[in-house]
Image (cartoon, rainbow, N blue to C red):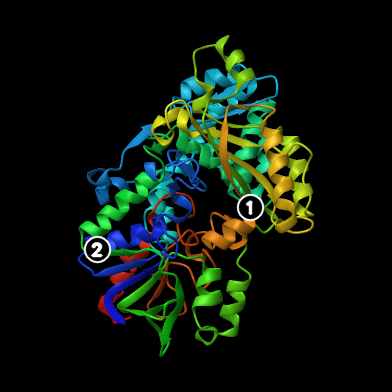
């Protein structure tokens, strides 16, 4: 069987759906192929436990922090297809074993007052940082939604002349460029609460000891900007379902259980996709890959389609490059999941519901010690954890009286003995570390996902959610590698449309949308 569409999209994650929906809205015929039984990839929420059919678990993404700062939802009309969100007043926080909590409020003034509880110095510094951080984020907002080649040196000069950074902003930019994330945190804050909160956050984005990784701290700026952090009502598949709705309403197709076996290249051009069942889907104008470049060019594109140099560039794309990766426990409970000590302690201060915050643990020194241990395949005794009772803010994802727990911890990508033997031990260790802070009533079941599982199920190279480490030399036109940026690849008619493309990983939809727009712009050139 051989069908023909204007475009074929390999991979039905949220970026693949964004690409397909963008093409369909523009009147192109498009088919999105997804190898799993449900769409969304790492952005899907689902009843993964047969014994808990009313508990929707999120194995990957859980919040919309970055997309909310862009016009994508409005431009695509996602609300017309059911997209609905819950704004989070205090999306993130830190907790210690005594139950003391720091909550990072959407209202920056309240966040500053919260920080004063731990350190007047840190509160003053955080308040002073808002100007420089917003200056940078205003520029990021402009660059984020455009093709990476849209701005050249002259454009930056014009912007800087119009939006001249003050002395504090210049000093801030200098520190981000020269410090690694942990250094910046150590030099900026004095309280364990602020240092620990920011250390955990930055450790999830990329190598925290890389030069320039101080820029990871900008991620928290989204907490205070615009609508802040939003959580799709009904789980992340609410967003996925809305994107699917845009795709299908405009005539596009989504096919599940349709694993791609090969991207067919003829005379140096991608012309079709061959599926595992032997069928072929042809593309008049191009193939967009939502898959990581390591997968796209490692197993799907014939080796002879790239030069030796190009193959080496793909081989050297960094993912989880310091042996640090994500370990997840997603748990369904028939009863309440709470933070007993934190809830009691918080009640003495105010009526804030700490269950609605994603709470992180560990001091900066704990995170430094853990990073050094993970490098050599080991871990610390009580690893820092990231805990979110997702059903506290969104009761619709659990049955009445029950809860859904999202638990994350950093682990070695390649532990001593391998994941076949280490999985059970890490499950026990990470959950025991979390139990220092939380209490679970009536566990129904859990899904435990190792970096190896993320790679096997979601084709996430080295278990990396972002596919490519967020390094200064892997951004813009250099993301994921020289000659592969700007959505173009060395194979004519083949475009990268996933987390490895500009602007970044995370839930944004923009890599897919911009890749689709770029592909359509190439139609008139015959390329």
How much space separates mark 2 and mark 1, taking CA atoms? Answer: 36 Å
Q: Provide the residue designation for mark 1.
A: 450
Camera-side residue of 337 and 20: 337
Q: Indicate the position of residue 286 as horizontal and vertical percent values.
A: 34, 76
| Tag 2–tag 1 contact (CB < 8 Å) | no
Q: Quadrant of the C terminus?
A: bottom left
Q: Which residue sits at x=61%, y=19%?
A: 340
Q: Is residue 346 above or below residue 319?
A: above
Left or right: 133 with respect to 40?
right
Do we see residue 400 in this rendering? yes
Q: Indicate the position of residue 271 as horizontal and vertical percent values.
A: 36, 82
Extreme front residue here? 51
Q: Quadrant of the N terminus?
A: bottom left
Q: Is residue 107 above or below residue 30?
A: above
Q: Which residue sits at x=52%, y=47%?
A: 59
Indicate which disc, 2 or 1, sits on the residue closer to the N terminus.
2
Q: Provide the residue designation for mark 2.
A: 24
């Amino acid at each position: 069987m051989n069908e023909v569409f204007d475009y074929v999209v390999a991979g039905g994650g949220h970026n693949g759906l964004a690409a397909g929906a963008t093409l369909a809205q523009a009147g192109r015929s498009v088919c999105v192929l997804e190898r799993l039984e449900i769409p969304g990839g790492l952005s899907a929420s689902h009843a993964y436990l047969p014994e808990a059919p009313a508990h929707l678990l999120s194995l990957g993404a859980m919040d919309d922090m970055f997309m909310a700062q862009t016009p994508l939802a409005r431009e695509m009309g996602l609300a017309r297809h059911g997209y609905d969100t819950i704004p989070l007043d205090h999306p993130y926080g830190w907790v210690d074993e005594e139950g003391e909590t720091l909550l990072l409020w959407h209202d920056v003034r309240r966040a500053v007052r919260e920080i004063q509880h731990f350190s007047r110095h840190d509160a003053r510094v955080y308040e002073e940082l808002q100007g420089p951080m917003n200056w940078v984020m205003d520029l990021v907002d402009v660059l984020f939604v455009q093709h990476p080649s849209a701005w050249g040196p002259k454009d930056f000069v014009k912007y800087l002349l119009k939006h001249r950074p003050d002395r504090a902003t210049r000093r801030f930019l200098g520190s981000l460029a020269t410090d690694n994330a942990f250094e910046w945190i150590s030099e900026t804050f004095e309280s364990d609460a602020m240092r620990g909160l920011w250390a955990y956050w930055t450790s999830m984005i990329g190598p925290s000891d890389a030069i320039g990784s101080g820029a990871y701290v900008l991620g928290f700026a989204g907490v205070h900007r615009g609508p802040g952090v939003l959580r799709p009502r009904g789980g992340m598949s609410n967003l996925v379902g809305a994107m699917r709705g845009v795709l299908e309403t405009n005539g596009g197709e989504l096919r599940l259980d349709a694993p791609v076996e090969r991207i067919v290249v003829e005379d140096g051009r991608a012309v079709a996709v061959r599926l595992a069942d032997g069928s072929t889907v042809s593309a008049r104008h191009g193939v967009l890959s939502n898959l990581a470049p390591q997968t796209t060019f490692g197993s799907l594109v014939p080796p002879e389609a790239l030069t030796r140099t190009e193959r080496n560039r793909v081989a050297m794309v960094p993912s989880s490059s310091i042996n640090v990766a994500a370990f997840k426990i997603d748990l369904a409970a028939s009863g309440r999941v709470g933070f007993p000590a934190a809830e009691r302690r918080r009640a003495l201060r105010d009526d804030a519901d700490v269950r609605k915050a994603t709470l992180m643990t560990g001091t900066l020194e704990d995170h430094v010690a853990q990073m050094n241990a993970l490098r050599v395949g080991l871990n610390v005794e009580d690893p820092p954890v990231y805990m979110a009772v997702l059903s506290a803010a969104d009761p619709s994802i659990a049955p009445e009286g029950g809860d859904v727990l999202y638990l994350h911890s950093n682990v070695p990508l390649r532990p001593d003995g391998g994941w076949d033997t280490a999985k059970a031990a890490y499950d026990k260790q990470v959950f025991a570390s979390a139990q220092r802070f939380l209490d679970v009533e009536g566990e129904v079941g859990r899904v435990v996902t190792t970096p190896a599982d993320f790679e096997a199920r979601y084709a996430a190279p080295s278990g990396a959610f972002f596919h490519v480490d967020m390094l200064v030399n892997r951004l813009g036109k250099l993301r994921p590698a020289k000659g592969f940026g700007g959505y173009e690849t060395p194979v004519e008619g083949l475009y990268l449309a996933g987390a490895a493309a500009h602007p970044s990983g995370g839930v944004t939809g923009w890599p897919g949308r911009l890749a689709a727009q770029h592909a359509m712009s190439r139609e008139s050139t015959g390329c």
